[in-house]
Amino acid sequence: MATALWSIVVVLIACVLGSFGPIYMKRGSNGLVFKAKALAKNKNLWIGSMFYLGSTIMFIPALKFGEVSVLYPIASTSYIWVSLLSIKLLGEKMNWVKWLGVVIIIIGVSFVGLGI
Amino acid sequence: MRTSGLAILLIILGTFLTSTAQIFYKTGADRLSLSFVNMLTNFYLPVGVFIYILAGVLMLVAFKHGEVSVLYPIFATSYIWVMLSSRFFFGEAFNMHRWIGVGIIVFGITLVSIGGNKKKEQAIESGEVV
């Protein structure tokens, strides 16, 4: 099965969208209170969940129309987007060791994708 | 912000639970039928959802005690759990390529954690003179 171009595009978009999920969940975790009212009012949790849900809904059909050896590594670029977004939106700091780790993870995922 | 060891452990546990939940979903979906008996006894799907929610709670707590750029890559441990479950639960054949890939992923995650705990940066963040 060849990988349809549209599935690559959809996976990429889903993955960028999905990367906003953990960022908002992190924000939501800062004032975390495990009470029903507080949780319901925690906007960041809601926004984060929407991003997660949206990206999952996009992913699942796209995965059926493409090979895992191509789509897995593309999906794993989420580690790059999350790292970049964490700098911009959360004020976290990256360094070369962390970036190297991210690149190595992507290489590892590519191996896994090729092995299936 | 320093990423605590506990936060890292919680993410590993949470990822393990998420992978477990997916096995429950798959099993539940495979066994799903529209019979009355099935509706009463097919507990796989609700159990899967419960485990998933539990995992979410653990991960939320973890995020409170660490950086996302350190903790999110740990989600990649899901590849380990999927590999183990496919080998031991679903009897799929041993695949060298995949195991090497998993090893590389673990190495990458370790580097990210090390990078996230560089003492000099934490000292700068907390205002000490370096």
Image (spheres, coloured by chain):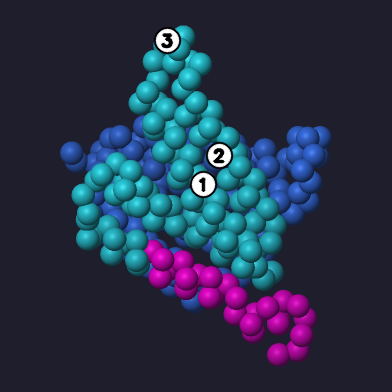
Chain colours: A blue, B cyan
* Label placed on residue B51: 2
Label 3: element kind: loop
Q: Is residue A87 above or below residue B58?
A: below
Residue range highlighted in magenta: B105-130
Overall secondary structure of the magenta section: helix
Residue nearer the viewer, A42 or A88 = A42
Q: Is residue B115 magenta?
A: yes
Mark 1 on the same chain as mark 3? yes
Q: Chain of mark 2?
A: B
Residue occupying the point 40% across, 46% down: A12
Q: Earlier in the sequence, mark 1 or mark 3?
A: 1
Q: Nearer the viewer, residue B42 or B50?
A: B42
Question: Badge 1 is on which residue?
Answer: B17
Q: Quadrant of residue A38?
A: top right
Along the viewing direction, whichever of A70 and B96 lies nearer the viewer: B96
Q: Which residue is mark 3?
A: B35
Give the secondary structure at mark 2. helix
Question: Tag 1: Cα neighbours inside 10 Å, few (<14), some, or many (≥20)?
Answer: many
Callout 2–callout 3 Cβ contact below 8 Å: no
Image coordinates of residue A59 in percent, x first then y, are: 41, 38
For badge 2, the amino acid type reads Ile
Tell me: A75 left or right of A96.
Answer: left
| Residue drawn at 35 percent across, 26 percent down | B30
Judge left or right: residue A21 versus residue B130.
left
Could you tell me the amino acid type at mark 3? Ser
Chain of the residue under the numbered disc 3 shown in the image:
B
Instruction: Describe the element under mark 1 as helix, strand or loop.
Output: helix
Position above or below: A64 against B117? above
- Circles 2 and 1: CB atoms closer than 8 Å: yes
Where does the image place residue A29, in percent across and percent down from the top left?
71, 51
Residue B96 colored magenta? no
Quarter of the image with the N terminus of chain B in it: bottom right
